[in-house]
Amino acid sequence: MEIERIQLQMHGDDRGMLISLEKDLNVPFDIRRVYYLFSTKCDVHRGMHAHRNLNQLAVTVRGSVTFLLDDGSGPCKVVLDDPSQGLLLRRMVWREMYDFTQDCVLMVLADQFYDPADYITDYDVFLREVHSGAYQAEVPAC
Ligand code: TYD
């Protein structure tokens, strides 16, 4: 599958660095929710689901994590370890996250409010739905 990374402009000076996330500038959707994962145990696998109607942008503000992504065409591994890189997670992409470093802070911007009913947690159901042809990518990259 195509991995969509968004390069985030760094504003740096002798005081340090700053990155701004802004709709249409570097976030290609309406931001309705932000959450972040931290203090994740290193042997933990998180995620293991897809969303029917949710687009997200993931940024490791600190540390590193590995994503396994699958849009139905097979798994693809992505290491996210740079606060100036966003990883676009479109709807109907199966995701798993693992190998969190102890210091990892993974921030996620989302275009929908939290909705447990939007989750697909069974990989076989995901494969059936994604291959049904009912889903088209809607969010253009910035
Ligand atoms: P969960 O979806 O299991 O995390 P992940 O799939 O990334 O491993 O979420 C963990 C808990 O946090 C669960 O009780 C639901 C809650 N939660 C919210 O209340 N709001 C949110 O936006 C998210 C993502 C989770």
Image: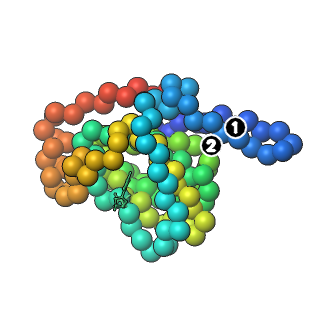
Report which residue position mark 2 lands on. Answer: 84
Expressed as whole percent of the image width and height from the top left, the position of residue 51 reads 28, 46
- Residue 93's x, y, as percent? 31, 45
The N terminus lies in quadrant: top left
Residue 140 vertical placement versus 62 (above, below): above
Question: Which amino acid is tagged 2?
Answer: Ser
Left or right of residue 20: residue 100: left
> Residue 86's spot in the image, x, y percent?
53, 42
Question: Foreground: 87 or 2?
Answer: 87
Q: Residues within 10 Å of mark 1 (few under 14, many from 20)?
A: few
* x 15%, y 52%: residue: 125
Q: Are marks 2 and 1 in contact (CB under 8 Å)?
A: yes
Of pointers 2 and 1, the one earlier in the residue sequence: 1
Q: Report the residue marked by disc 1.
A: 10
The residue lying toward the viewer, choosing from 67 and 116, is: 116
SS label for mark 2: loop
* Quarter where residue 139 is shown: top left
